[in-house]
Amino acid sequence: MTENTFSEDAPTSAATDAKKCVVLLSGGLDSATCLAVARDQGYDCYTMAVDYGQRHRAELAASEKLAEAMGAVAHKVLHIDLRNIGGSALTDDIDVPEERQGGIPVTYVPARNTIFLSMALAYAETVGAERIFIGVNQVDYSGYPDCRPEFIQAFQKLAQLATKVGVEGQPLRIETPLIDLNKAEIIRLGDSLGVDYGLTVSCYQADEQGRACGQCDSCYYRKKGFAEAGVADPTPYQSTTDAPA
Ligand code: ZN
């Protein structure tokens, strides 16, 4: 586990009165917007990224840059190698599809949000955070079962039952501010809150510099989102033919 603490006197326990939250910050567009929402609500934000062996490594570097640029109190990277389990185009020897398909896509990572939220829960309890922000969204990616409100509600119940703070009656809530927004609405929201989307990486097969492929599902929805939002798309692409006109 690695940790960056951005402020000299960053509190790591309940040392200040400011309300705290943990933000799952993958480095993508949604999680960056989620961090901006949490910050706008007045939280001290403890950001967390997970190095799970994802093939799009550039998002981890993006996550760290975003945390610093957006004033996170501290940024933590946890390591759990989901390649040992596989079963996804993001962690296994399965090609990322270039066409959108029906059903749950092969980019689904088995139980990923359950694993990530469990890690965030441990971190939240330790730093005394009262909220966990996660940028799940059920509109554009309706195929992922662990992005649905029913899943979040179930995890919320687990969080109360599974933790010392929950048993002692302190609230620890899961916040999903993007769950009902489409990609264009998310981009407009983040734009209004000053998110620099040029720092974010959405592509499932971004190169080492974070440049997008322009072909995968994630690139498709991101590009469409900027166009629909009427916001300039700062995404760097590997091929200039993919760059927005
Ligand atoms: Zn892509």
Image: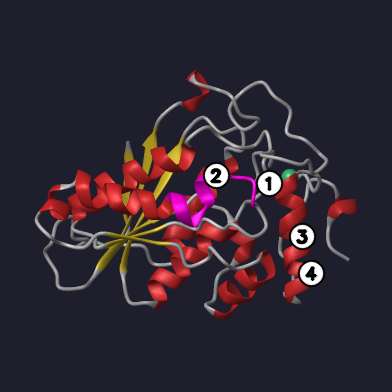
Q: Which amino acid does label 3 sit on?
A: Lys
Indicate the secondary structure of the residue bearing disc 2.
helix
In the picture, the disc for residue 223 is 3
Total numbered labels placed on residues in the image: 4
Predominant SS of the magenta segment: helix
Q: What residue type is labelled 4?
A: Ala
- Kindly report which numbered mark, 4 or 2, lies closer to the viewer in this rendering: 2
| Residue located beneath label 1 in the image | 203
Q: Which amino acid does label 2 sit on?
A: Pro
Indicate the secondary structure of the residue bearing disc 3.
helix
Residue at 65% over, 30% down = 89
The magenta-colored residue range is 142-151
Instruction: Indicate if the residue with disc 1 has its beta carbon within 8 Å of ligand 1.
Output: yes
| Residue located beneath label 2 in the image | 145
In the picture, the disc for residue 227 is 4
Ligand 1 quarter of the rendering:
top right
